[in-house]
Amino acid sequence: EAGVAQSPRYKIIEKRQSVAFWCNPISGHATLYWYQQILGQGPKLLIQFQNNGVVDDSQLPKDRFSAERLKGVDSTLKIQPAKLEDSAVYLCASSRSGTNEKLFFGSGTQLSVL
Amino acid sequence: GENVEQHPSTLSVQEGDSAVIKCTYSDSASNYFPWYKQELGKRPQLIIDIRSNVGEKKDQRIAVTLNKTAKHFSLHITETQPEDSAVYFCARGDNDMRFGAGTRLTVKP
């Protein structure tokens, strides 16, 4: 089966600019996650979708970050405006039906904010 | 959901020795405990997982133990090999999936 697709692979922007990341989960996977992984740290859950509904966005900085999952399939994560501390790898993951299952990760988007 | 604490942050062992990484959680509703391995520049990959109705699970050189009363679970790697060198993350799942901060394991030949 095809894996989780993410784009772009790399992005360099200046602070206060905006950026968007795209994720297409494995076909049929109901649950989609966005994680932020700062160098040397564990993945931090930003938002979790079940189909097109939000399950958890308690750690999403909602003043600058937004995410949507159109029609319960692919998803977009946006940052506007970006700060230096947003420099990280943004990982998208999906699972078949919930949080008690294996997560399949995409290759991530490495964001550098200058 | 609550996060999960992971220790140690770094671990260095000699090839052939055992390695143990421990995680603790606070939310008693957590019922799924996976372990992921992340090699440099790559995505995390599941290596083993355990559910709350089981106390131990083994897969060749890797085992995971769960103590629900004490709310901790551990990863055990026996007969370590250089290719086991990576960062290991524990996680816990109930309504969401939260990860620990990671343990950088180095296996010296």
Image (cartoon, coloured by chain):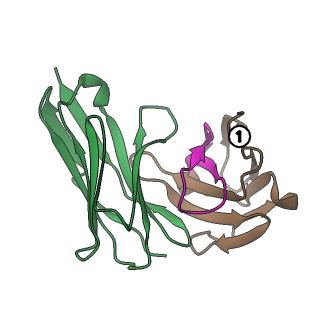
Chain colours: A brown, B green
Magenta-colored span = A87-114
Identify the residue under disc 1. A6
Image quadrant assignment for residue A9: top right
Q: Nearer the viewer, residue A33 or A76?
A: A33
Q: Nearer the viewer, residue A22 or A86?
A: A22
Quadrant containing the N terminus of chain A is top right
Residue B107 at x, y percent in the picture? 20, 29
Residue B71 at x, y percent in the picture? 28, 72
Query: Which residue is outermost to the right?
Result: A71
* Residue A114 appears in the figure: no
Query: Which residue is outermost to the top?
Result: B109
Image quadrant assignment for residue A59: bottom right
The residue under the point 50% across, 59% down is A44
Q: Nearer the viewer, residue B94 or A58?
A: B94
The residue under the point 76% across, 50% down is A28
Q: Could you tell whether B30 is left or right of A78 in the image?
A: left
Quadrant containing the C terminus of chain A is top right
